[in-house]
Image: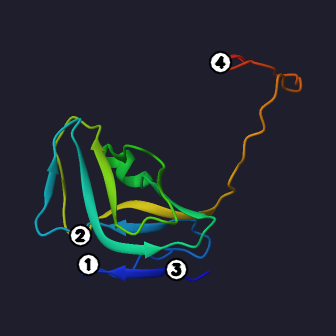
């Protein structure tokens, strides 16, 4: 699949790092570093704009190493970019660590996964079919 993209940053386009990677790293596009204090959240621009085909979304997810090593994650994970959005791709980061963290221009801050999705329609009903699980919700199968 080809996706139309405008790159206003000085960085290369997102790319798959390995042959079987699902996500492409997104890089911060900043004039100067942005420091996140503990529990602070900020929106980080990427300088990228794209045109997804109908029936697809881009999911913005944390980078596992950044989350593990520094406590930095994507707050609304996964964030969704819809096919009709034409604005700049931005990433909502939060610092869950107890120390400040600075995001610099070019830092890999998140990963983006392109995913196909269905558009659902509702069919109102008076009852639903029964299953073994039924209405069992949070924690119903034990620890």
- Between the C-alphas of marks 4 and 3, the distance is 41 Å
Q: Nearer the viewer, residue 42 or 66?
A: 42
Q: Residue at x 33, y 81 (%)?
A: 7
Q: Which quadrant would residue 134 be assigned to in this image?
A: top right
- Determine the residue positioned at 50% across, 60% down: 82
Left or right, 60 with respect to 56, comes to left
Q: What residue do we see at 37% from left, 67% from top? A: 26
Point out residue 131 in the picture as x, y percentages from the top left corner. Answer: 88, 25
Foreground tag (4 vs 3):
3
Precedes in sequence: disc 1 or disc 4 = 1
The disc label shown at residue 3, or none: 3
Reading the chain from its start, which is encountered first: label 2 or label 3?
3
Task: Name the residue carrying label 2.
Answer: 29
Q: Nearer the viewer, mark 1 or mark 3?
A: 3
- The spot of residue 70 in percent (x, y) is 29, 47
Upstream in sequence: badge 1 or badge 3: 3
Q: Quadrant location of residue 129?
A: top right
Crowding around mark 2 (Cα neighbors within 10 Å: few <14, some 14 to 19, many 20+) is: many
Q: Is residue 141 left or right of residue 43?
A: right
Q: What percent of the width, then of the height, locates residue 124?
A: 77, 32
Residue 9: mark:
1
- Circle number at residue 139: 4
Q: Which of the marked residues, 2 or 4, is nearer the chain's N terminus? A: 2
The answer to whether mark 1 and mark 2 are in CB contact below 8 A is yes
Nearest-to-viewer mark from 1 and 4: 1
Secondary structure beneath label 3? loop
- Cβ atoms under marks 2 and 4 closer than 8 Å: no
Q: Residue 1, relative to residue 66: is it above or below?
A: below
Quick one: label 4, few (<14), some, or many (20+) residues within 10 Å? few
Q: Tell us which disc is closer to us: 2 or 3.
A: 3
């Amino acid at each position: 699949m080809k996706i139309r993209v405008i790159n206003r940053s000085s960085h290369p386009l997102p790319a798959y790092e390995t042959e079987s990677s699902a996500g492409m790293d997104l890089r911060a596009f900043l004039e100067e570093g942005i420091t996140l204090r503990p529990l602070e959240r900020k929106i980080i621009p990427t300088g990228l704009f794209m045109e997804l085909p109908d029936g697809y979304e881009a999911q913005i997810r944390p980078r596992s190493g950044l989350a593990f090593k520094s406590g930095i994650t994507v707050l609304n994970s996964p964030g969704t970019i819809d096919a009709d959005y034409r604005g700049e791709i931005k990433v909502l980061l939060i610092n869950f660590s107890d120390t400040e963290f600075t995001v610099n221009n070019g830092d890999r801050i998140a990963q983006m996964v392109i995913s196909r999705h269905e558009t659902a329609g509702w069919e109102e009903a008076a009852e639903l079919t029964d299953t073994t699980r039924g209405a069992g919700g949070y924690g119903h199968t034990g620890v």
